Structures are given as C-alpha cells and as structure tokens.
Image (tube, rainbow, N blue to C red):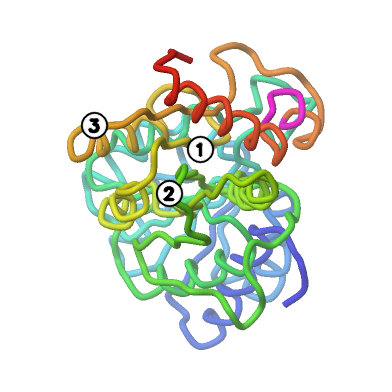
C-alpha cells in the first residue's frame, strides 16, 4: 500500500471485506468524495447509503441498520459528526449499543482555511465523555489499516477520527505492531515521555530524534487508543522519566492531555504539560501552516520538552 490518506485506507479495507461480507454497509452525508468512499459506492451500490447533508439522519439510519444485523460505517466530517449529531451518537449508537463505527473524516484542522466552523478541536473530549463509546485516532495509513481490520471483528460502537490528507508514515509497511487498545512505545528514554496521538505522533518521534542530538533522551508513545486509554503502557512509559509532555491536535480541555494527567496524578504524580491547539479560534491556513504557527511540529515539541525539563530542575512553573 502506497502512502495514502487514512480515510483511503479505511475505504480499501472495507471494500476488501465487503466483497465477501454483504452485511457491511457504508453511509455518507454528501461526503463520499471528501471521505474517499466513491469507490465503495460505485462497486457496492446496494451496500451504500447516501443521506445528503443530514448528519443526524446519517447516524440514526446507521444505528437502525446495525439493529437489523448490518455492520454500519457512518462517514462524515468530524466537525459535524461530533457536534451536529451528538445526541444521535449518544443515544442511537452508544446507549443503544449498536454496531456503528463513526468515521470522522478531515479531523482537527484538516479543513484549514475554512476556519473554526470546519475545525474539530473538541471531538476527543465530546466523544470520550459518552459512556460505551470508544475513541481512536490512528497515526498513519498503515496503523489505520490494522485498526479498521480489527474493528470489523467486533460489534461495539466506536468513533475513529482521521485527517484529510496523506501524512508521513510512522511505521514501515510489513512492520506495524498492533494490538487492539494497546498503545505503542516507539522509542525509550529516561528524561521525558512524549505521549501523542493522530498526526502529532510523527512530529513527536522526530522531536525525540532532535532531542537525542542534544543529549536528551525521550520515550515516545503512540496513544492511538484514546478511549479506552492504555493505562498500563502509559504508566510503563512514564515510570522512570522526569516529566511528561502530551501532544494533540485538539483543544487544551478534555482531550488526551487531560486523560493522561488524570492517570499520572492518580498513580505516579509528576509534572505533566499539554501541547494542544489554543482555547481560541485557530488561525486559518493549511494543516502544516497551523501546526507550525502553534509549534506543533518537531522543533516546537523538542523546545517545549527542553523547557519542561528545565522547569523540573529549577522548580519553575510553565
């Protein structure tokens, strides 16, 4: 598989499975093109539902199909899926325990210049707050492929957030360690632990490489499973480090950073700092421009890690 967007990886896995499993159904809210599901709709018209721009109907229809024994995949922009149809996600999918996988495409700031109305910087907090809802944010198309294959084997609700464009892979084809609901430790270091998810994993790993050249050794964790959070791997990763830095494409409230801080505070208190988007309307621009502006890139993460370690040594507050 070449370097493709995560949403394309989801479509390819579902198409391969749908050729023998006629219970697989994909649903889109006028989003088959932006969600890369046009090939699925063309090859499996009887297993595809187009609701139009009606996200609430999208989720409810998916839940109804799931109750009839179908394996429903509802594909819609994350900014709308996680807000406009929030009640349907909560009641029709999670509370009713239906086999619906909610695919939030173009998550985070993927829509760039379209601005705050199209950014999804609150979805981790919102979806994680729903009982019985799992939340996954894979880091590249190879991990997305593994995750989608695993989700085909269960019948529980889940929300999967992916970006819009192809990103530089974290893993190598043929070498993708994957266990459902288990995070991956990408490298080990005794100075600081960097916990990241989604598109922030690759810059976090690159930041560790930069830090190593300056004599700072970082542990990097790919926490693709935001809920359920892999506490065992997290505690293993932070046990011997001096400080913890979390990195996410999300609001500073209620996301990965908040969850990590709760676990560490309860089990092994130490300084935790969260790098995230600001609590303000995000600037407009491409994903790369936005990340660079807020320091959500390898140099920015490396600098923040050094600032955090310096604060730990001096007793300062950041």
The structure residue drawn at horizontal position 44% and vertical position 25%, both measured from the top left corner, is 313
Q: Which mark is residue 81?
A: 1
Residue 248 appears at what percent x and percent y?
A: 53, 36
Label 3: state its secondary structure: helix
The residue beneath circle 2 is: 159
Closer to the chain start, of discs 2 and 1, is: 1
Q: Residues within 10 Å of mark 2 (few under 14, many from 20)?
A: many
Q: CA distance from mark 2 to mark 1?
A: 10 Å
In-front residue for pair 279/99: 279
Residue 30 in view in this figure? no
Q: Is residue 101 above or below residue 295?
A: below
Label 2 with label 1: CB-CB less than 8 Å: yes
Q: Residues within 10 Å of mark 3 (few under 14, many from 20)?
A: few
Label 2: state its secondary structure: strand
Q: Nearer the viewer, mark 2 or mark 3?
A: 3
Q: Nearer the viewer, mark 2 or mark 1?
A: 2
Q: Which mark is residue 223?
A: none
Residue 118 appears at what percent x and percent y?
A: 66, 27
Q: CA distance from mark 2 to mark 3?
A: 27 Å
Residue 9 appears at what percent x and percent y?
A: 64, 67
Closer to the chain start, of discs 3 and 1, is: 1
Closer to the chain start, of discs 2 and 3, is: 2
Q: Residues within 10 Å of mark 1 (few under 14, many from 20)?
A: many
In-front residue for pair 299/316: 316
In-front residue for pair 222/97: 222
The residue beneath circle 3 is: 265
In-front residue for pair 21/255: 255
Task: Magenta stretch: give its range.
Answer: 291-295
Q: Is residue 269 above or below residue 11?
A: above
Q: Residue furthest left?
A: 266
């Amino acid at each position: 598989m070449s370097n493709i967007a995560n949403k394309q990886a989801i479509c390819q896995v579902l198409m391969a499975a749908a050729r023998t499993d006629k219970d697989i159904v994909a649903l889109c809210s006028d989003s088959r093109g932006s969600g890369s599901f046009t090939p699925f709709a063309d090859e499996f018209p009887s297993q595809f539902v187009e609701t139009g721009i009606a996200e609430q109907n999208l989720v409810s229809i998916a839940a109804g199909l799931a109750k009839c024994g179908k394996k429903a995949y509802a594909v819609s922009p994350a900014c709308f899926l996680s807000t406009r149809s929030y009640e349907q996600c909560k009641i029709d999918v999670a509370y009713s325990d239906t086999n619906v996988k909610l695919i939030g495409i173009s998550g985070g700031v993927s829509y760039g210049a379209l601005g705050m109305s199209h950014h999804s910087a609150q979805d981790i907090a919102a979806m994680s707050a729903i009982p019985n809802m799992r939340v996954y944010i894979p880091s590249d198309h190879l991990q997305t492929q593994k995750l989608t294959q695993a989700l085909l084997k269960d019948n529980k609700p889940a929300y999967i957030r992916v970006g819009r464009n192809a990103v530089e892979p974290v893993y190598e084809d043929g070498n993708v360690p994957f266990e459902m609901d288990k995070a991956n430790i990408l490298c080990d270091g005794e100075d600081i632990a960097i916990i990241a998810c989604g598109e922030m994993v690759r810059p976090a790993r690159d930041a560790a490489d930069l830090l190593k050249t300056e004599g700072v050794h970082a542990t990097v964790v790919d926490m693709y499973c935001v809920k359920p959070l892999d506490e065992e791997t997290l505690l293993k990763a932070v046990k011997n480090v001096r400080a913890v830095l979390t990195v996410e494409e999300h609001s500073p409230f209620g996301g990965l950073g908040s969850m990590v801080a709760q676990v560490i505070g309860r089990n092994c208190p130490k300084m935790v700092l969260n790098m995230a988007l600001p609590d303000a309307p995000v600037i407009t621009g491409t994903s790369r421009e936005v990340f660079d502006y807020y320091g959500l890139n390898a140099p920015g993460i490396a600098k923040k890690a050094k600032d955090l370690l310096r604060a730990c040594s001096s007793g300062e507050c950041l």
